[in-house]
Image: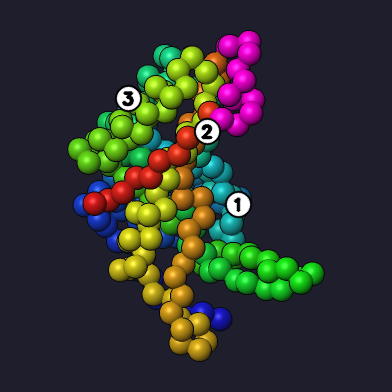
Amino acid sequence: MPDIMMTNEVSHSRMKVTEIGEFLRKPPAGFSVVALSSGYRVHSDPEKSLVLIDDLHSCRGNIVFHKSLGRKVKMHNLWEYSSFRKSLLSRRIYLLMSACEENFSLANRKEARNTRALKQYVVSIDGNDPFIKWQMEKGLDWTISSVAGESYRVDIDLTEALESWAAKNIHIATDDLIKVEPVWRDASFTLKYYSDALFDFPHWFGLSKRKFQLRLT
């Protein structure tokens, strides 16, 4: 078993990472946690926080983030898009991500890869931070201008930001004392816009998918 040294909660000027157990024990300002027989229900202030976390089934039971929009947000008109975009650029955004150990094995003479979750973290970024806001505005404008009038999907990826954070705050060593870098799973959230166009060929053929990275520096 790998030796894992992780801090429960670490902040960056633009990003905060909190282990899920610590988050439930000491929820941040604007959040409250209700313990249930089946798990936990987490409440937040939608005027201040934008929660994009799917329901979680874990060893702690079911963890439900009340009124969360989920990791994949669907929009069907420009009003919904404008409203969501305004929230993205003005509130603190909360996501759930997993730090995993990557394993390689041989199966049927082919190299198979799988991951094992080590810990789960609630990651929050400040959408109103000038640098984060600039990146999201630039990425969303690029997506819209690329596929105006069509359905599209855009993934906002935090992998690079988390790798930068993990390099300083997570240390994993195998039984042979070899340092292992964690692999991040679910390190993005998705906007899906559905147009009412009758012949949305780019979307049908997967040509309207976009992705951009959020960075801390």
Q: Residue at x 38, y 45 (%)?
A: 213
Q: Secondary structure at mark 2?
A: strand
Chain part drawn in magenta: 196-207
Residue 209, which numbered label?
2
Q: Quadrant of residue 17?
A: bottom left
The residue under the point 46% across, 50% down is 187
Nearest the eye: 175 or 148 = 148
Question: Which residue in the structure is indicated by mark 1?
Answer: 57
Q: Nearer the viewer, residue 209 or 27?
A: 209
Q: Helix, strand, or loop for circle 1?
A: strand
Residue 45 coordinates in the image, percent (x, y): 35, 34
Q: In the rendered image, which residue does mark 3 sit on? A: 86
Amino acid marked by disc 1:
His
User: Where residue 94 sits in the image (x, y, percent)?
Assistant: 39, 43
Give the mark nearest the N terminus, 2 or 1.
Answer: 1
Q: Position of residue 111 (x, y in %)?
A: 68, 69
Task: Give the residue type that dot 2 points to.
Answer: Lys
Identified by mark 3, the residue type is: Lys
Q: Secondary structure at mark 3?
A: helix
Badge 1 crowding class, 10 Å Cα cut-off, few under 14, some 14 to 19, many 20 or more, is few
Front position in the image: 165 or 29: 165
Residue 99 horizontal/vertical position (percent): 48, 62
Mark 2 touching mark 1, by CB under 8 A? Answer: no
